[in-house]
Amino acid sequence: MYDSPALENTVDTKDIKISANNVQVFYGETHAIKDVNVAIEDKTVTAFIGPSGCGKSTFLRCLNRMNDTIDICRVEGQILLDQEDIYDPRVDPVQLRAKVGMVFQKPNPFPKSIYDNVAYGPRIHGLAKNKADLDDIVERALRRGAIWNEVKDRLHAPGTGLSGGQQQRLCIARAVATEPEVLLMDEPCSALDPIATGQVEELIDELRTSYSVVIVTHSMQQAARVSQKTAFFHLGNLVEFGETSQIFTNPVDARTESYITGRIG
Amino acid sequence: MTDASLSGPDSTPLPQGKTSLLAQDSRTKRRNAAEKRFRFYGMAAVGVGVLFLVVLLVAIVRNGTPAFTQTFIELPVQLSQEKLDPDQTGDPEVIKKTSTFGYNGMIDQALLDLMAAHGLDSPFDKGADLRKMISASVPAQVRDYAIAHPDQIGQTVVFKVLASSRVDGYEKGRVTREALARDKNLDAEHLDLVDQMRDAGILKRSFNLDFILGTDASESRPEQAGIGASMVGSFFMMLVVLFLSLPIGVAASIYLEEFAPKNWITDVIEVNISNLAAVPSIVFGILGLAVFIQFAELPQSAPLVGGLVLTLMTLPTIIISTRASLKAVPPSIRDAALGVGASKMQSVFHHVLPLAMPGILTGTILGLAQALGETAPLLLIGMVGYIASNFPDGIAAGFLDPNSAMPAQIYEWAKRADPAYYERAWGGIIILLVFLLTMNFIAIILRRRFERRW
């Protein structure tokens, strides 16, 4: 059933980029994430799959502390990025988010020009010394986002005027413009049509050469196509984590098998 | 084609237990009737509202427009050399020594000469009787001219003088001969003379710019009163309101909406702000009296104090509308900014605030419009009852010297006994409404201009 390229995907390196140890997340009284341990490798696409409400998005948002904006959310345990605890009180979440970029479920370009969308991150982080430098960064980011050819003639048109798929690639370009080390993607293709999805997936595979990519997806085919590692979440637990090919062909846990064969979820 | 399909729907036998779609059952009929009734109630309510609005507008325009015209008499006055400047010094200081009473003789003579020159059949021998037809402001008008133009002393100058309010009322149909029977200010003979003067072309009704730009006058000279000085008072009050309530209101809203933790203290603050918006404005007036005038000892009747009181009153409105427009900015924009590593403040000031701007500006302008029309709090800080007969000389005086405000001036006029003031009150309302409509129009333009673009 899943005769996908996942079987041929190989894992390039084994450096651990992010490691989560005994992570618990509470929303008020609700225990949303229970005791998750996972090691996310560098230059690898890691997919989080699982039924709705299983906590995969919540866990993803812990990795760049986007959950801080929710008052009732509480995170326990340890998440290490390059051996440093990102929940250490000395860590400024703003610096963390410059290193761990994020792409959201719905394309959310700023209501500004395409150029300003991409240039915003480098500007606030002071990455460009002058205008020419900034132009370079914007062009590089848009090329990496595989959207340069489509927008190079209208960089000053509003980003919100692009099609859904273009907007999402613009958001990816915006995220990579700040030179992050990890790119988190929360269901980046759920609002896109199959052609746009294909383009974004291709892009994800290219991004893997430079970044560690973590993607949350509802589509198991997508996880199989783009990822090398897959984590299956169920009811707040990390049920199984391993090579994508192994998860989809030979799952260890009965729940994983039920999910990928369509019996739960 | 079968027989069944050829015959009408009524004759088609329906299978057992089926109903036809072509006939409404009683339940559907009742539902449709209820909907029709409800639509009728709605239309009736709208109709009643529109009717009231039309009646209001017609009443305002009909009663108010006469205030914009005034009856004038062209009166040549000889500025008497021996009376004003017997030594021919040409020095304004010498001319100033003659008070306005000193001009009455000249004016009386001028009126008698005017009657004679046009061959009018005047029943009055004494100029003082003729003087009842012109405004009490004329001697001052002639005196001001003489002081300003000493070289004209000894010459005859044609003045365009205001007719008295009774004569003006006769021209506008407000005053009748019957009504004058019990009026000691003017007699029916005067009106006969007015008819003659009109025919002779020396008495005319024309547009009176002084009503819009002039100052208020005492109770006995309604023909001289204008709303200009209180317009200046309102202007300085609005400056105070704008420069205090916009920054304070927006800063408070941004803090409460974006930064403040959600706990019981902020809940209490939120409830209180909503309640403050509903507090009767006169309560703010007495608060202003107690705090700004009695405690802080700021001057009474000053636009500064009025502005402070109206700021207190406008703040809740601005805070509520600002918070609503901040809330309306989609959270995805905040996420996007935080996601590329913007700080909370950067995400608010670079992305959220510009998007909320049209709403904030609209709310502010509507708040200002509300403050502009507010009368009750001004009652208590002494901006009502004050006769704004002078313009403030300078910016500081504009804030600190006693003045009135447009709605307070209108209230003051409506309160005075002379029916000529009643007409001016309506005229003042037209001017106030023009300001309010302009502000609302600007609010609409701004909203259109910066329409949300996401």
Image (spheres, rainbow, N blue to C red):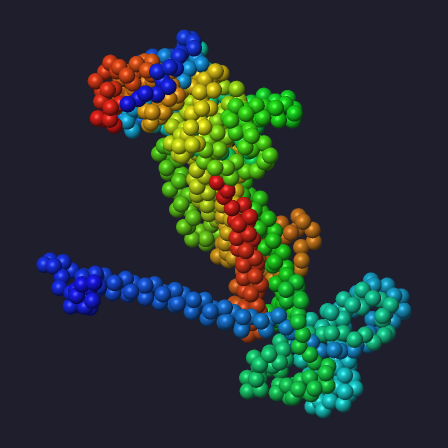
Q: Is residue B350 left or right of residue A39?
A: right
Seen in the picture, residue A149 relative to B14 is either above or below; the reply is above
Quadrant the N terminus of chain B occupies: bottom left
Outermost residue toward the front? B1
Coordinates of residue B260 in the picture (x, y in percent): 43, 32
User: x and y percent of residue B68 in the render?
Assistant: 62, 70
Q: Does A221 sit left or right of B229 as displayed?
A: left
Q: Nearer the viewer, residue A191 or B250?
A: A191
Q: Position of residue B144 (x, y in %)?
A: 76, 66
Q: Which sits in the foreground, A136 or B313? A: A136
Q: How many marks?
A: 0
Q: Is residue B403 visible?
A: no
Q: Say if residue A72 shows up in the picture.
A: yes
Left or right of B449, for residue A83:
left
Residue at 41 percent of width and 30 percent of height: A197
Quadrant of the rendered structure where residue B218 is? Answer: bottom right
Residue that appears at 64% across and 86% down: B191
| Residue found 56% across the figure and 33% down from its top | A151
Is A52 above or below relative to B437? above
The picture quadrant where one finds residue A182 is top left
Which residue appears at 67% of the width and 55% of the height?
B392
Q: Nearer the viewer, residue B426 or B14?
A: B14
Which of the pair A223/B93 is nearer the observer?
A223
> Given the current orientation, which residue lies at the most extreme left position?
B16
- Please state the horizontal and vertical placement of residue B271, each as a whole percent of the image: 37, 42
